[in-house]
Image: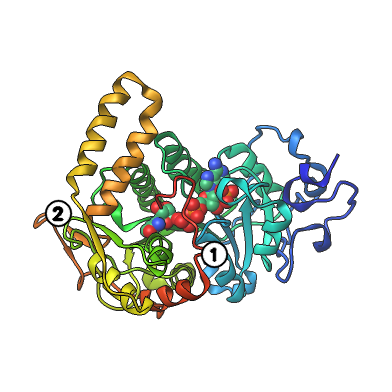
Amino acid sequence: MSTSTFFCGITPNSSTPTFKNLYSFHHPIKTQPNSSKPSVFYQTRFNLVTASTPTPLESPPKSSFRDKPPKDINVLVVGSTGYIGNFVVKELVNRGFNVIAVCREKSGIRGKNSKEDTLNKLNGANVCFSDVTQLEILEKSIENLGVSIDVVVSCLASRSGGVKDSWKIDYEATKNSLLAGKSFGSKHFVLLSAICVQKPLLEFQRAKLKFEAELVEEAEKDDGFSYSIVRPTAFFKSLGGQVELVKDGKPYVMFGDGKLCACKPISEPDLASFIADCVLKPDMVNKILPIGGPGKALTPLEQGEMLFKLAGKKPNFVKVPIEIMDFVIGVLDLLVKVFPSLEDAAEFGKIGRYYAAESMLIYDPETKEYSDEGTPSYGKDTLEDFFKKVLEEGMAGQELGEQTIF
Ligand SMILES: NC(=O)c1ccc[n+]([C@@H]2O[C@H](COP(=O)([O-])OP(=O)(O)OC[C@H]3O[C@@H](n4cnc5c(N)ncnc54)[C@H](OP(=O)(O)O)[C@@H]3O)[C@@H](O)[C@H]2O)c1
């Protein structure tokens, strides 16, 4: 049997759970002194995992994990191979935490990354290959590590944004990581959500909101447990799609007058730093934290103007009426009634429409207005610097997800 059939990096013939047997680089996991489970560490094979309930920690930590130095704090990161998750792992590792990164054996967009690629990308973390969509398997994988968990950070997200996948990942798998973390002592949960859940019109937003509500309820029931819900504005990858086109002399395409929506984009390292702050900072506990990048909010028109200036090209805009999207969505909605398999296509149309018209800023449901000033800023990376970089180096590392929508 090959190594790839084993959980959490255990080699087939290993007889002792040494750090060498872990996919661990610089920060080996600290095993609980009283853990009674190290043997399963090297005995459990992927295909032998049963749906048993894990043994809870014999004595959950009494003192708060916040009193411990980072090197003694075990942080479980799910969604660790994503655009943001990958940076969150790096940031937590750099801050000295013991990071356990849960991954699939084939990770990345359309599973393009092998186990080796994943191990290289997550250098410094303890990599645990498991399945977040199956609670029993996830719990068994954590049990096999023989460690307690202090904090769970979730950067999970549906890679497609399709209806069923959103519920499976943004709700169910995220809930599994909450339950599995709590079974092994976790006292804090940091959730990467999205600012757009303020005005939920899409399935992935409803799935995220349901999980957010249950997370808050969990903290209300249990005083020893807390959360930080991070709701970022747009990511750079979502705004860079036209940089290379403009560089090649193509027009910049925008909806309406180019002022229908605005955002304060935040870079992956800045957001990862904000998320890492949530692990220990007491003022980020039990809060919903909307967050954008530095500077003022920018509309697509302003982004396009900035881009033409940086590229040294004469501004050339194509304005597409938003009604075209409404028409396409209307047709798809009708077709779904006859062909249910078109459900995701219709949802992708709605996602595109949403991003074309709704700002990624703080929203006031009473006035129905978005606020630039009301949206907090964090970090130092600007969209202008990002555009300059893409003009020079291209979009590598900024690829959109499976449906190239977000
Ligand atoms: N795009 C934006 O502008 C924007 C703005 C604000 C907020 N957000 C939110 O930010 C969050 C993260 O976004 P992102 O771009 O970092 O996401 P991403 O790159 O698509 O990463 C998703 C993560 O979830 C994991 N995942 C997905 N399906 C899985 C499955 N079936 N089993 C196991 N793991 C699975 C992926 O693992 P694999 O690598 O194995 O696939 C990956 O680690 C999302 O909630 C998004 O809504 C996005």
Image mark for residue 42: none
Front disc: 2 or 1: 1
Q: Is residue 48 left or right of residue 335?
A: right
At a point 29% along the width and 21% down the height, the residue shown is 337
At a point 47% along the width and 68% down the height, the residue shown is 268
Looking at the rendered structure, the secondary structure element under dot 1 is loop
The residues bearing labels 2 and 1 have C-alpha atoms spaced at a distance of: 38 Å
Looking at the rendered structure, the secondary structure element under dot 2 is loop
Q: Kindly tell me whether mark 1's CB lies below 8 Å from ligand 1.
A: no
Q: Quadrant of the N terminus?
A: top right
Q: How many marks?
A: 2
Q: Kindly tell me whether mark 2's CB lies below 8 Å from ligand 1.
A: no
Q: The disc labelled 2 sits on which kind of residue?
A: Pro
Q: Which residue is mark 1?
A: 396
At a point 29% along the width and 69% down the height, the residue shown is 304
> Percent x, y for residue 30?
71, 65
Mark 2 or mark 1: name the one nearer the start of the chain. 2
At a point 41% along the width and 69% down the height, the residue shown is 247
Badge 1 density bin: few <14, some 14–19, many ≥20, Cα 10 Å: few
State whether residue 285 appears in this view. no
State whether residue 149 appears in this view. yes
Q: The disc labelled 1 sits on which kind of residue?
A: Ala
> Percent x, y for residue 96?
62, 75
Please, is residue 175 above or below residue 356 in the view? Answer: above
Q: Which residue is mark 2?
A: 365
Task: Tell which of 100 and 36 is nearer to you.
Answer: 100
Please, is residue 231 above or below residue 208 in the view? Answer: below
Quarter occupied by residue 20: bottom right
